[in-house]
């Protein structure tokens, strides 16, 4: 997979006006994540550091104090501009609020690459390396529909989202899941406007286990007959499972999610999560570092996957209950590449 990513990235590189070459050891790359505690971003940092060491570049890492801490991300951008960074890799907590700081960085000649969460529009950054989050959601929606069979027509669905802010990654996963399950999403760029009677409701989790537990409890109070739960990520899925277990419903409800982290893959193996869509954040960040080093040498900016507004770093469905027509890998297979 790594060689395929590298080949595709090279094919997607787009020429820009070249300028003086930089030596790799002079290349400072900023990595700004939403938090430094979420294992997804820990893996991203690992990928960036390993690739930078291999190429002789330097990574300086920053993170929000919590998911949604835009002020800390803005300050990190300002610090990196002042430090003379060649590039910034960022998972934006609030793409709209970060727009002015990103523009200042680009005006200063800094290459800005969004990781995981695209800006809106995507052209706000020089490039985006991300999972196709709509496809990630669609895969688990298709799997859930196939798994439920005839019962899908009478499903009772709980949607455990990230927030109410319509953040691009949140919307794409949610709408992808509903589309895969066969539900009309009305306006694809806006959540919560659906009127399908199978949807019990939405609640927010902030992407945490505690948030997932609280959201699941709230929706169970609304309708105890829920039998399918979509979650924005695997920590939220783990929390939802604990809430279901507390009322003896854990064996009656299918949980699907997105992430593909090692704990999440283990939860698939243990039957906590029915299916999850695996992302590759380590590869995402490593490719970002490669792109900044290349840009510093030649002025060549990374491009996008043909037909998409971003460079697609891949997604893979992980489940131990394969469904006809939905390609997947087992949890044992997933363990060897979780978040790689």
Image (cartoon, rainbow, N blue to C red):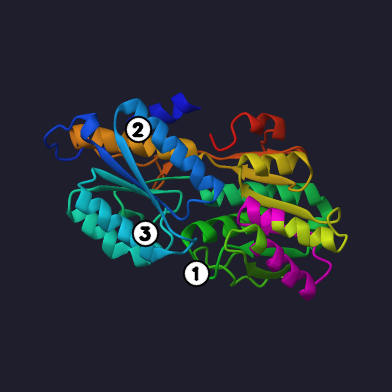
Between disc 1 and disc 2, whose residue precedes?
2
Task: Indicate whether 201 appears above or below 168.
Answer: below
**Which callout, 1 or 2, points to the residue nearer the camera?**
2
Q: What residue would you read off at disc 2?
A: 52
Queried whether the magenta region covers residue 191, the answer comes back as no
User: Distance between the Cα atoms at labels 1 and 2?
Assistant: 34 Å
User: Distance between the Cα atoms at labels 2 and 3?
Assistant: 21 Å
Q: Furthest-right residue in view?
A: 248
Q: What residue would you read off at disc 3?
A: 73
- Specify start and end residues of the magenta stretch as a single range: 211-238
Point 41% across, 57% down: residue: 92
Quadrant position of residue 173? bottom right
Quadrant position of residue 203? bottom right
Q: Horizontal and vertical percent for residue 309? A: 38, 49
Crowding near the residue tagged with mark 3, few <14, some 14–19, many ≥20 C-alpha atoms within 10 Å: many
Crowding near the residue tagged with mark 1, few <14, some 14–19, many ≥20 C-alpha atoms within 10 Å: few
Q: What residue would you read off at disc 1?
A: 165
Between disc 1 and disc 3, whose residue precedes?
3
User: Distance between the Cα atoms at labels 1 and 3?
Assistant: 17 Å
Point 60% across, 51% down: residue: 137
> Mark 2: which secondary structure?
helix
> Mark 1: which secondary structure?
loop
Point 78% across, 65% down: residue: 156
């Amino acid at each position: 997979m790594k060689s395929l990513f590298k080949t595709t990235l090279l094919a997607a590189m787009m020429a820009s006006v070249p300028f003086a070459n930089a030596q790799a050891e002079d290349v400072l790359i900023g990595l700004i994540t939403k938090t430094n505690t979420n294992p997804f971003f820990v893996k991203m940092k690992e990928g960036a550091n390993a690739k930078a060491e291999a190429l002789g570049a330097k990574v300086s890492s920053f993170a929000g104090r919590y998911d949604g801490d835009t002020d800390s991300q803005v300050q990190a951008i300002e610090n990196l501009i002042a430090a003379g960074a060649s590039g910034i890799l960022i998972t934006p907590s609030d793409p709209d609020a970060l727009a002015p700081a990103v523009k200042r960085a680009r005006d200063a000649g800094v290459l800005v690459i969004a990781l995981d969460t695209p800006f809106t529009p995507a052209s706000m950054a020089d490039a985006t390396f991300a999972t196709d989050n709509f496809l990630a959601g669609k895969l688990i929606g298709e799997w859930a529909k196939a798994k439920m069979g005839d019962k899908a027509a009478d499903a009772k669905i709980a949607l455990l989202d990230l927030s109410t802010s319509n953040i691009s990654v949140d919307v794409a996963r949610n709408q992808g899941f509903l589309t895969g399950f066969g539900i009309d999403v009305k306006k694809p760029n806006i959540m919560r406007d659906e009127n399908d009677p199978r949807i019990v409701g939405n609640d927010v989790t902030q992407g945490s286990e505690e948030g997932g537990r609280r959201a699941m409890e709230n929706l169970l109070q609304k309708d105890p007959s829920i039998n399918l739960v979509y979650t924005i990520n695997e920590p939220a899925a783990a929390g939802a499972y604990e809430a279901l277990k507390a009322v003896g419903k854990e064996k009656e409800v299918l949980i699907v999610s997105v992430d593909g982290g090692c704990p999440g893959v283990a939860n698939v193996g243990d039957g906590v999560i029915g299916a999850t869509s695996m992302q590759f954040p380590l590869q995402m960040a490593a490719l970002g570092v490669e792109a900044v080093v290349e840009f510093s040498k030649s002025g060549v900016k990374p491009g996008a996957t043909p037909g998409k507004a971003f460079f697609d770093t891949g997604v893979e469905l992980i489940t131990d209950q394969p469904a006809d027509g939905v390609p997947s890998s087992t949890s044992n297979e997933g363990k060897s590449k979780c978040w790689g």
